[in-house]
Image (cartoon, rainbow, N blue to C red):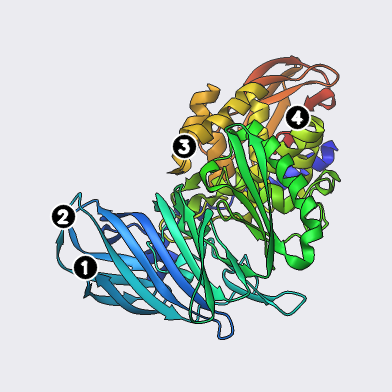
Amino acid sequence: MKNIIQLYAIATLSVLCLPAHGQLMKAKELFNKADSLRGMLTPLRTCYDVQYYHLDVKVDIQNRYISGSNLFQFRAVESFNRLQFDLFENLSVDSVKFHGKTLAFERSYNAVFVDFPSTIEKGKTDSFTVYYSGHPVAATRAPWDGGFDWKTDSNGRPWVATACQGLGASVWWPNKDHQSDEVDSMLVSVSVPNGLMNVSNGRLQNVEKLENGYTRYDWKVRNPINNYNIALNIGDYTHVNETYQGEKGPLSLDYYVLKENKGKISHLQKNAKQTLDALEHWFGPYPFYEDGYKLIETAHLGMEHQSAVAYGNKFQNGYLGRDASGTGWGLKWDFIVVHESGHEWFGNNITANDLADMWIHESFTNYSEALFIDYHYGKDASLAYVHGNRQGILNDKPMQGPYHVNKEGSGDMYPKGGVLMNMIRRIIDNDEVWRRILRGLNENFYHKTVDYGDIVQYVNKESGLDLSSVFEQYVQRKSIPVLEVRKTNDGQLQCRWISETPDFKMPIHLGIAGETLKRYEVTSKFETLPIKTEDLKALHIDTFNYYIGVLMQ
C-alpha cells in the first residue's frame, strides 16, 4: 500500500511542475464575443433589475415551433435609455413594446439591444414586453446539451420538456440571461394542444380552454427563481398529491408521471419523503414551501428545476440502476430524486452568481447523496460512499471555471467536490458544528446568489479555522496536495505540504497505527510533530478521508 501511495505521489509531483493556467488565463484568450455578451455583466445589463416576468408561450408540437411573449417588469438601478436582454439568434424577436409603442432594437449573436425613446430614471419601476417566435434549439442529449427535448411516450403521445442549465434560458425564451439575476416572482403560461398537460414551476393557478384547439396552463412562482430553472413539461400526465409534515409545517408534494406509469408513483413517494427527511435535517427547511415540491417524469434523465424537479430515472434505485461508488450504498435509493432534490438547497436556494462557480451547486449536492446515506444508513456507510466516488475524479482542470464567459469548470466538481466537503467535515472533526455550518449556509444565503468568496469566508468564520488555502487548492487548482513525511535521526517525525497553492496549509489526522489519530497543523515548510517512531511503516495517515498524495522519505 505504501508503495502505491509513493508512486501516486511521484505522479502528482510531476503534475505540480507544470504551469497552472485554468482560472488565471484571460477570458479573451479562450472565448469569443458571444460568450462575453452572455457571461459578462455590462452596464447595459446592470442598469435594470428584473423583478417579475410573465412568460406566455404557445408550443406547436407538430411543427416544433414556439411563439409568445415575455413581460419584463423592472426597477431602474441606474438611469438609462438602452439595455440588453438575451434570446438565441435562431429565434425571431417580432417586436418590443413599451407603453403601447414599438421600440427599436438590434441584435449581436444572442444579445438584443433595445433603445428607449427617453431616459428611464434611476429608481423607477416600469415594464416592456418582448414578442418572439421560431424553432428553438432541439436537444440531442438532454439535459447535457440543452434546449427542447421533443419525444413521444410508448403510446405515441407527445412528451416534451426543456432543460437549459449552462446553455442558458434564452435558448427558448427572452430574459436577462445571467445566473446572478433572479426575479422575485413569475407567472408561466404555457399553451399546449388539447388533451395534453403542461407542468411548470410553482403552483397551478388556472387552466383555460382556448378557441384554437389549445389549453393554457398558468403556473405562479412566488419565490425568487433563476432563469435556467424555468421549465415546461408537456405530456399525457396523471397527478397524485400528498402532504409532508416538514420543519416549516405542511409541504405539498405533487407527482406527475405518464398515465402508463401511474402504478409506479409509490417509488417516487418513498424516495421523496426519505430525501426530505435527510436533507431538512442536514441543510434546514426545504427552501420553497410557498411553491411546493414536485417530481415530474421526463424522457431525459433529470434536472433541478426549482419546485418542479425533472425525473427520468425509470423508477429504479441507483443511477439508471448503477452505483458509481462501487460500494453498493448507491443502490439503496433513487439517485435522481436525491441528487436533483439536493439542488433545491444548493443551486436553487443558494445560487452561484457566475457559472464559473457552478462547483458550489454540484459539490454540495454531490455531498448531499452521502448525507442522505448518513441519515438513513449511518456515518460509516456515508464515508465509504464518498471514498468510492474518488474513482471518478480526473484532476484534469480546476473545478472553478473562468469568470464572465458563461463557462463552468471541470466535471470533477461532482465527485471531487463531494470528497472536498467530506474532507472539511473531517478537518472540523465535530459533526454538530458541521451540520450547523450546512444549515447556516442555507439560512444566511437564503434565496440569494453567492460567489466563491462568500462560501469560503462563511465556512472559515463558522468553523473557526482558516481553510482558505484548502479551498484554493481543491477548487482553483487541478492537482491534489502531497504530504511529504520524513523522520530525523532520532526518530522524530517531520511533515510538510507540497502543492500548487503558495504557502499552503491544511490540518491532517495522523498517528501511530493502533492509536487514536490526532489532528495536526501542517504547512508548506517542514515542521516537527510530537510523534516519534523508528519505522515510518508504523505511521497511519488518514488517507481514507483526506484526498491527498503521500511521499515517504
In the image, 164: left or right of 296? left
Q: Position of residue 36 (x, y in %)?
A: 38, 64
Name the residue: 43% across, 61% down.
405
Q: Secondary structure at mark 1?
A: loop
Residue holding disc 2: 121
Instruction: Indicate which disc residue 113 carries.
Output: none
Kind of residue at disc 1: His
Quadrant of the snapshot with the N terminus: top right
Q: Secondary structure at mark 2?
A: loop
Q: Secondary structure at mark 4?
A: loop
Q: Earlier in the sequence, mark 3 or mark 4?
A: 3
In the depicted structure, whether residue 2 falls above or below residue 338: above
Residue holding disc 1: 99
In the depicted structure, whether residue 200 falls above or below residue 360: below
Q: CA distance from mark 4 to mark 1?
A: 66 Å
Q: Which residue occupies the foreground of this view, 507 or 55? A: 55
Residue holding disc 4: 542
